[in-house]
Image: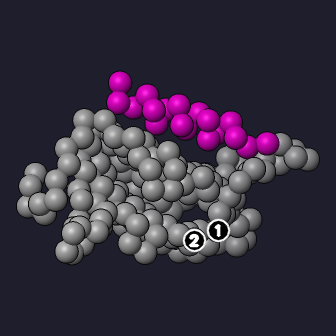
Amino acid sequence: MPHRGILVALIVATMSFVRANGQEVARDQIETSFQAEWSLIDQKRNIMVAVGNVQLKWMGGSIRCDNAVIWGIFPKKGQPVAAKGKFLAREIYAEGKVFVRHGVRLYTLRASRGFVDPVRNRGVFFDTTISMDITGKDCPVTLTARAAEAIQIANNRFELQGITLTTSPFSE
């Protein structure tokens, strides 16, 4: 079941809110700027649905994708976010041409879909390609890993399943 990991992550993300004075308050969040062609915010559930060329940026990382569901703390009613703005993000589910970048040159990741926790630098990605520059004997070399599933366990550490490694930019 390829969706089991995402389902578990979504359940955990939903349960990680606490109640304070009748309001849901996130335990951890990170300031995030975003842009999309269209977005809708559900204030009651602290969820944003963003559609079309979604771009999210936070300190140390960014993600681009076709569509996203974002859990976080959003501006109150009367403070429109429309399709561009800033908010406090907690978790992100992204799908469709997902492109994640962390650090200046730490790594780039492409996937068909994934769940990202920008606060803890963790995530789960499917149909993944990860590229990173490593230092060779005489020059830098780009190492590319392709995997059916990638689980990000730390800032620059991944557990990969169904992996193929290459240094050739032309291999499939």
Which residue carries the number 1 mark?
Answer: 31
Q: Residue at x 53, y 31 (%)?
A: 8
Which span is picked out in magenta? 1-18
Location of mark 2 (residue)? 59
Label 1 amino acid? Glu
Up-down relation of residue 113 to residue 98 (above or below): above
Q: Quadrant of residue 15?
A: top right
Q: Please state the horizontal and vertical placement of residue 129, each as a whole percent of the image.
A: 26, 53
Residue 92 shows in this picture:
no
Contact between labelled residues 2 and 1, with CB atoms less than 8 Å apart: yes
Amino acid type, callout 2: Met
Mark 1 against mark 2, which lies toward the viewer? Answer: 2
Q: Which quadrant would the N terminus be assigned to in this image? A: top left
**Pointer 2 local density, CA inside 10 Å: few below 14, some 14–19, many at least 20:** few
Which residue is at a point 16% across and 53% down the rendered structure image? Answer: 166
- Front in this rendered view, residue 86 or 114: 114
Q: Nearer the viewer, residue 167 or 70?
A: 167
